[in-house]
Image: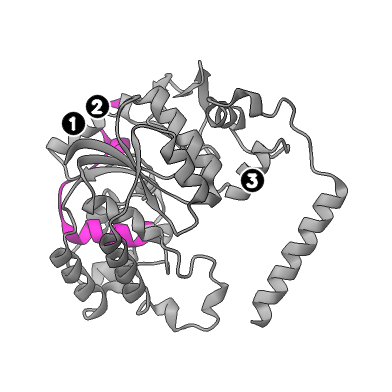
């Protein structure tokens, strides 16, 4: 058993992001902190090669845990109201094993931090991990600022139960791209209890969106009713920072990003809404519109500077035409399936 560590979820599709994340952790968090990569699926050839090249990185191999979380997701989502609608295959997230990120609770680290693979680590985790002495979950996001209509949980349905009021729920909303917690939470018996509430008591209706790991995770932490802390609600203003590449302004100081307002250090940069295809093309030298792409390329090729693109070029007209054709063809195939 290890005292602290880091988890992420990855496969070969997000290989470029994984390498950039691992390098950023080594530089900005610690060279020695153990890291465990949870398999998104079995496409792991490049991931395994990368893991074998690093002394402190390992693959999560608890098949029982992964199967348990896969089963939980499948059974719960099967009774969601959206599952009763036709043409489920049109949902790109259908059958996605994203909930495997919660295998973190079954791993070997007593305390841990999870990063989505499309992130860059920007500072040490000591203060974050120390908060786990007082809290069971620590988050760092602004989900609680969303309007009533856009929250992860259906507030109207929940309020009718009399169990929670809107003001009680809003402060507990969070994302799933970055969080700190502890081993042993959501043990098998506790997961069964939650599954019973979701399925037998029809509380799946509390979850607004179908097949979304973050939305389901919100339900679980709310219903589990353990102490939760969000840094963006901290009384310490230095804790309240941005983290999204596509939304927040940052200042770069020696390839470390700081909140532009007050130069407050951030825990991570999250490249939310950018696809793995975009990052793969960027790493091949294509001029892709990704904010903070220079920072990404710096960490991606930190150990392979000779492979870093020296000049980014826009795709040719032929390439863009072929991509548009293939995209249109795929949409047609889905519509007639």
Mark 2 is surrounded, within 10 Å at the Cα level, by few (under 14), some (14 to 19) or many (20 or more) other residues, namely: few
- 12, above or below 56, in the image: below
Q: Which residue is mark 1?
A: 130
Q: Which residue is mark 2?
A: 126
Magenta extent: 214-237
Q: Are marks 2 and 1 in contact (CB under 8 Å)?
A: yes
Magenta span contains residue 27: no
Nearer to us in this view, 131 or 296: 296
> Tag 3 or tag 2, which sits nearer the N-term?
2
- 40, above or below 294, in the image: below
Identified at 80% across, 63% down, the residue is 325
* Distance between mark 1 and mark 3 Cα atoms: 36 Å
Identified at 22% across, 81% down, the residue is 200
Please state if 217 lies on the left or on the right of 118 as rendered: left
- 1, above or below 254, in the image: below
> Tag 3 or tag 1, which sits nearer the N-term?
1
Q: Secondary structure at mark 2?
A: helix
* Distance between mark 2 and mark 3 Cα atoms: 33 Å
Q: Which residue is mark 3?
A: 278
Q: Quadrant of residue 305?
A: top right
Identified at 44% across, 84% down, the residue is 84
Q: Secondary structure at mark 1?
A: helix
* Distance between mark 2 and mark 1 Cα atoms: 6 Å
């Amino acid at each position: 058993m290890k005292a602290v560590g880091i988890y992420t979820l990855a496969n070969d599709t997000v290989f470029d992001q994984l390498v950039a994340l691992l390098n950023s952790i080594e530089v900005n968090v610690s060279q020695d902190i153990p890291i465990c990569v949870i398999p998104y699926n079995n496409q792991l050839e490049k991931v395994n090669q990368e893991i074998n090249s690093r002394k402190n990185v390992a693959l999560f191999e608890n098949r029982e845990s992964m199967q348990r979380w896969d089963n939980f997701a499948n059974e719960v989502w099967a009774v969601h109201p959206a599952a009763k609608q036709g043409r489920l295959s049109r949902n790109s997230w259908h059958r996605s094993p994203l909930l495997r990120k919660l295998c973190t609770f079954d791993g070997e680290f007593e305390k841990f931090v999870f990063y989505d693979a499309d992130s860059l680590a920007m500072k040490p985790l000591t203060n974050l991990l120390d908060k786990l002495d007082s809290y069971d979950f620590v988050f760092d996001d602004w989900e609680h600022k969303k309007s009533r209509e856009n929250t992860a949980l259906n507030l109207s349905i929940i309020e009718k139960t009399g169990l929670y009021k809107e003001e009680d729920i809003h402060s507990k909303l969070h994302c799933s791209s970055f969080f700190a917690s502890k081993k042993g939470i959501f043990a098998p018996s506790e997961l069964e209890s939650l599954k019973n509430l979701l399925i037998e008591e029809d509380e799946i209706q509390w979850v607004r969106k179908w097949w979304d790991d973050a939305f389901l995770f919100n339900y679980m932490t709310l219903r589990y009713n353990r102490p939760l802390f969000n840094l963006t609600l901290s009384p310490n203003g230095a804790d309240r920072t941005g983290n999204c590449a596509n939304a927040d302004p940052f200042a770069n100081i020696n390839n470390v990003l700081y909140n532009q307002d007050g130069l407050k250090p951030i825990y991570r940069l999250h490249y939310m809404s950018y696809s793995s295809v975009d990052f793969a093309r960027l790493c091949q030298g294509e001029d892709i519109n990704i904010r903070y792409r220079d920072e990404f390329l710096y960490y991606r090729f930190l150990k392979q500077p000779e492979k870093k693109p020296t000049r980014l070029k826009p795709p040719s007209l032929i390439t863009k035409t072929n991509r548009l054709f293939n995209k249109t063809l795929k949409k047609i195939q889905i519509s007639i399936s």
